[in-house]
Image (cartoon, rainbow, N blue to C red):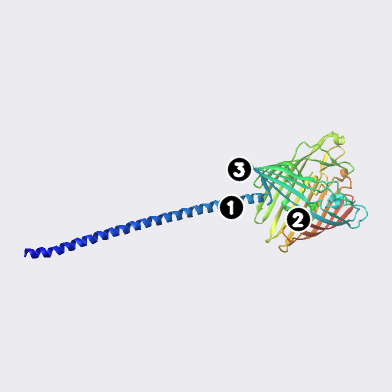
Amino acid sequence: MLAATCLTATPAAAQDAGIEERLDRLEALVASLLERMDAEQGRMDARQAETLAATEQALAETRALQERQVQLAAQIDEPKKQEDKGFRVGNTTIAYAGYVKLDAISQRTSGGQVGTGSIVRDFLIPGAIPVGGPASGWDSDFSARQSRLIFKTATDVGNGHELNSQIELDFMVTPGGDERVSNSYQPRLRQAFITYDNWLFGQTWSTFQNVGALPESLDFVGTTPGTVFERQPMIRYTRGGLMIAAEQAETTVTAPGGARVLAGDDTLPDFVLRYNLARDWGSFSAAGIVRNLRITDDDFGTGTDSALGYGVSLSGKVKLGDKDDLRFMGTVGDGLGRYIGLNIVNDAALDLDGDLDPIFTYSGFAAYRHVWSDKWRSTIAGSYFKADNPVLLTGGTVTDESWNVLANLIFSPVRPVDIGIEYMYAERSLENGLSGNLQKIQVSTKYSF
């Protein structure tokens, strides 16, 4: 029995040993599989890390490219602040603008012939309309002298300050031209000024004049009899809609007999206060001026005298619908002569005691602009001027009143080009009752750049 038991137990023990051996091999296999899986996971993590790094690098490069594009766009846009054109030199952006314009003008006058080469044949000067002579025929002239050049600069001076300048030239009312050979004309200075933040120093449009209210006309000014029109040196301060300026003074005097004298004895500037209001419906400006009119003994030999000049001008532009507008100006005052209508009358007259008597005037214009389509537009306008001359001092040959009307049609085949035709009628009356008129047909082509 013992032997049988031993024989029976031996196979069982061997069987258990075999199972344990297989379990060990299985465990080793599992461990090897796990090791290979861990290695593969490590390689996958490494590839993912490489992919992530490559993605981040690509994103960084994309962001850098976008930043360079933004910087480039800013460099391209910066000159656009200066009339969409310009280039940079150091911290200064230099830009240019202007236009080339050809005027073909045919006009006739009822009260006398306007001589060839006279500026009265280039644009309307109300105080120079001939009076009292025989009527002229239709006189025609071609000219490109209104063409204009504008140069601007903007300098980055840091600390949030703005430093700019502008110089503007054209060829109007200058000598040198002829209609025989060359038609050459000398350039003239229109504007030259510096601006630093809110301050302006230099020559530009008078603060008493609202350029934004001027109507669109082919004539150089258009509604000249009723328009404040003056460019001169000044110091101006602007804050929001408020403008305060001290501007060049110049007293124009009517001497006994009607002659114009420029005294040149002014000691105080002309002071101007103006407020501008801009709203969705349009814009409005109110301006006031105070002047010290002055002469001294060396002008007339009658001693030194001064007088107060003053005036108010209201002007603006009212939108009518999406594109049309109404523009207007009304001015009244004493001693404003040289500011109105290209100096139609003088600031003051000299009495027998050598004292200045300021001349009271009132004037104004209205203009309606209608846009027919994207390429066609028209303006109709009228203006009026009246002077209260002291006739006993000025005589009867000075201008009493002047007025004009105009209508035009302008075609723009492409955005920077205007081609237009305009008809104008203007009239001037003297204190002695004589009058004369001017009729003008003008065709113009202008390319703005």
Disc 1 marks which amino acid? Gln
In the rendered image, which residue does mark 2 sit on? 447
Seen from this angle, which residue lies furthest right?
134
Residue 432 versus residue 371: which sits nearer the camera? Answer: 371
Disc 3 marks which amino acid? Gly
Which label belongs to residue 404?
A: none
In the figure, is residue 366 to the left or right of 176?
left
In the figure, is residue 397 to the left or right of 202?
right
In the rendered image, which residue does mark 3 sit on? 160
Q: Which residue is depicted at the point 48% across and 53% down?
A: 56
What percent of the width, then of the height, locates residue 244? Answer: 69, 43
What percent of the width, then of the height, locates residue 260? Answer: 86, 43
Q: Which residue is depicted at the point 74% across and 59% down?
A: 369
What crowding class fits label 3: few (fewer than 14 Cα within 10 Å), some (14-19), or many (20 or more)?
few
Disc 2 marks which amino acid? Tyr
> Spatial distance from mark 1 to mark 2, Cα to Cα?
33 Å
Secondary structure under the numbered disc 2 in the rendered image: strand
In the rendered image, which residue does mark 1 sit on? 69
Secondary structure under the numbered disc 1 in the rendered image: helix
Q: State which mark lies toward you, 1 or 2.
A: 1
Label located before the other in sequence (1 or 2): 1
